[in-house]
Amino acid sequence: MKVTFYGIGYVGLVQATVLADAGHDVCCVDINETRIANLKKGIIPIYEPGLTPLVEKNFAEGRLTFTTDAEFGVNFGDLQFIAVGTPPDEDGSADLQYVLKVAETIATHMTSPKVIIDKSTVPVGTADKVRAKAQQVLDSRGSDLTFAVVSNPEFLKEGAAVNDCKRPDRIVIGTDSADAEELMRELYAPFNRNHEKIIVMDIKSAELTKYAANCMLATKISFMNEMANIAERVGADIEHVRQGIGSDSRIGFQFIYPGCGYGGSCFPKDVQALVRTADGIGYESQILKAVEAVNYAQKNKLFEYITKHFGKDLSGKTFALWGLSFKPNTDDMREAPSRVLMEQLWAAGAKVQAYDPEAMEETQRIYGSRPDLSLMGTKESALNGADALIICTEWQNFRAPDFDLIKSQLNEAVVFDGRNLFEPTRMTKKAIKYYSIGRGLSVTGE
């Protein structure tokens, strides 16, 4: 099948590449000329395990093309995927200007019937707006060309997106067109062989399904962080609590790890957007507002521990920071807890020596060169002369460090762990003061 994607960011590039790898012909359109030129050279704009060789392979074999020519893209594919960004507006609602601009572009250049597919995460009712915009343009052209609008939300996890596309646990298709449904089933047939994964529903339900999924996951995280805060105050160990409730099959172990807050491009934005959607229809979403409030407070948690230990004036202090991305296996720093913490440390007069396996360039892009930030080449070099170690991201290679080296390199043997990577009893035996989330302070008895 011939498919066009508009918006070659995280979602668009991964989904387009996996569809090309399944045998479809896919054209990728983006207004960013530098991005398109780099993609043609094999330079991928994001870090995602397994993506680069897949892009290179399918580009070389001719199934994946990149262009800034929107008219070419419109007339290339029968299926037109909108995968542009929907950033938060000033009030937290999703900004649909880029989605509607693509709909306008498709209707301006189309010379045959099209299926327009909303892949971007969009509020309920967006398909109606896309349909109205496209029809308005066609009417202005005096054209009687037909089109269908489909909601096909993505459910990708950063760091595992390629596998999520290749082996989806469900494929949600929202449509009121039998012909569009048939085309979508044909498109996804290579991914629907093991068992039936396609779920067809009305468009508004499909739009809400995406938000409901992300908001449920965000709720689990904030709930567990709230339990961790209670555990600290009553003297319980949240890790024991996690094991106790996770063994219940109705709850499960996924997304019940306490920490220093969630971030990324999806959860913060989608929780806010659904809250604003609810407000717009006169319903107050008390749970989602609480989820957002708990997460906001949780991102201050590490700084609270640090000032509890060192005092509020951190002038002259230097902190080693392991982990900058909002989660492992990505270089994405959007809404990352590390950003909140670093900015708090700088405001208090401290310096940061940071290391992340993949997010160093992104950190440089965001903050530029500044005297209170040093980006280090290894996690070990970040320790040199620092007053304490802080962990913000649970990268695998942080889980088994050389504790003797940590002690010898730090001015004081103290670790602030926002991801609960280590056992407090082990840290006590190592004579390291250990602050973790919901597990109490490991005191060395000095």
Image: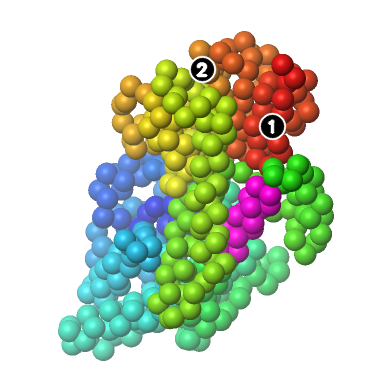
Q: Nearer the viewer, residue 275 or 60?
A: 275
x, y percent for residue 403: 68, 18
Q: Nearer the viewer, residue 423 or 396?
A: 423
Residue drawn 51% across the image and 35% down it: 303
What is the secondary structure assignment of the residue under circle 1? strand
Magenta span main SS: helix
x, y percent for residue 314: 45, 24
Callout 1: 10 Å neighbours few (<14), some, many (20+)?
some
Q: Nearer the viewer, residue 234 or 289?
A: 234
- Which residue type carries mark 1? Leu
Q: In this view of the protein, can residue 322 be seen by the observer?
A: no
Numbered range of the magenta stretch:
215-230
Q: Which mark is residue 386?
A: 2
Magenta stretch contains residue 335: no
Query: Marks 2 and 1: which is nearer the front?
Result: 1
Q: Quadrant of residue 251?
A: bottom right
Q: Is residue 159 above or below residue 76?
A: above
- The residue where tag 1 is placed is 441
- Which residue type carries mark 2? Ala
Q: CA distance from mark 2 to mark 1?
A: 20 Å
Residue drawn 57% across the image and 67% down it: 287
What is the secondary structure assignment of the residue under circle 2? loop
Residue drawn 26% across the image and 89% down it: 144
Residue drawn 64% across the image and 14% down it: 407
Disc on the earlier residue, 2 or 1: 2
Q: Is residue 381 above or below residue 325?
A: above
x, y percent for residue 435: 64, 32
Q: Nearer the viewer, residue 443 or 211?
A: 443
